[in-house]
Structures are given as C-alpha cells and as structure tokens.
Image (cartoon, helix red, strand yellow):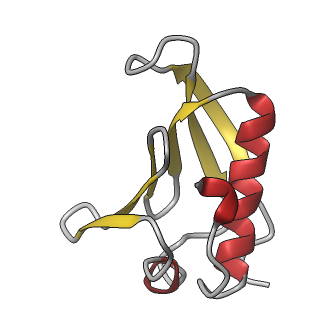
C-alpha cells in the first residue's frame, strides 16, 4: 500500500459555484511516485511540469494533485469530500489501473 490516507486539511467557499466548497487534502506521503500512474486515469487533462501538478476534470470542477497537497473544487458536501479523498487513495494504491468512477 503506497498511500494510507489523504486527510482533509481545509475547506473554503467555492467562488465558481456558491453553495459548494473547495477542499484541500494532505496525503500521508508525497505523490511524486504515484503521479505517473495516476496520470493514465480517465479525466486527466493537464500536466504542469513547472509546478509539478496533475489536474483532472470532474463533472463539476477539478482535482489537482500537487506533491504534498490535493485541491478539489466545486465539492457538494462533507460526504462527497470523504468519497473523493478515499477514491484518490484507492486509485493511487491500485497503481492507476482502476479508474476513478467516483470522481466522475
């Protein structure tokens, strides 16, 4: 198991869609080694080599993976936050081979 958890670190109001939130998560280890595998998953839309970030498109909003942080925009509620962070953990641990249906 590469990643044991992605802890919720912060929530902020989402300016793009009032009533939704932006979430910051902190993985228990860096995502450096996992990013190449996760980049093969459906929904990956952008790699920024200067910032070392990988961004995924969700039906509403985005999920961006940084080295030591994860940002998710336009999240509905705390329940969805937990689902998304668990889906990220599971995808990283599967080596990027299982797809992230709950992101979509």
Q: Position of residue 37 (x, y in %)?
A: 51, 86
Instruction: Using the rendered image of the protein, determine whether residue 6 is visible from the camera's viewpoint.
Output: no
Q: Position of residue 52 (x, y in %)?
A: 31, 67
Residue 93 in the figure: left or right of residue 31: right
Q: Position of residue 14 (x, y in %)?
A: 47, 20
Residue at 58%, 12% (x, y): give it. Answer: 19
Q: Please tell me whether residue 82 is drawn above or below residue 74 in the rendered image.
A: below
Q: Quadrant of the N terminus?
A: bottom right
Residue 50 in the figure: left or right of residue 58: left
Q: Nearer the viewer, residue 100 or 22?
A: 100
Residue 38 in the figure: left or right of residue 85: left
Instruction: Using the rendered image of the protein, determine whether residue 17 is visible from the camera's viewpoint.
Output: yes
Q: Nearer the viewer, residue 81 or 65?
A: 81
Residue lying at the far top of the rendered structure: 18
Q: Quadrant of the C terminus?
A: bottom right
Q: Please tell me whether residue 94 is drawn above or below residue 82 in the rendered image.
A: below
Residue at 52%, 53% (x, y): give it. Answer: 69
State the image quarter where residue 12 is shown: top right
């Amino acid at each position: 198991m590469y990643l044991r958890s992605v802890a919720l670190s912060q929530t902020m109001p989402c300016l793009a869609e009032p009533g939704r939130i932006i979430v910051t998560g902190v993985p228990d280890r860096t995502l450096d080694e996992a990013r190449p595998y996760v980049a093969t998953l459906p929904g990956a839309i952008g790699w920024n080599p200067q910032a070392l970030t990988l961004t995924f498109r969700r039906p509403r909003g985005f999920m961006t993976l940084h080295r030591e942080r994860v940002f998710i925009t336009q999240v509905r509620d705390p329940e969805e936050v937990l689902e998304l962070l668990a889906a990220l953990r599971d995808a990283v641990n599967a080596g990027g081979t299982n797809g992230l249906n709950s992101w979509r």
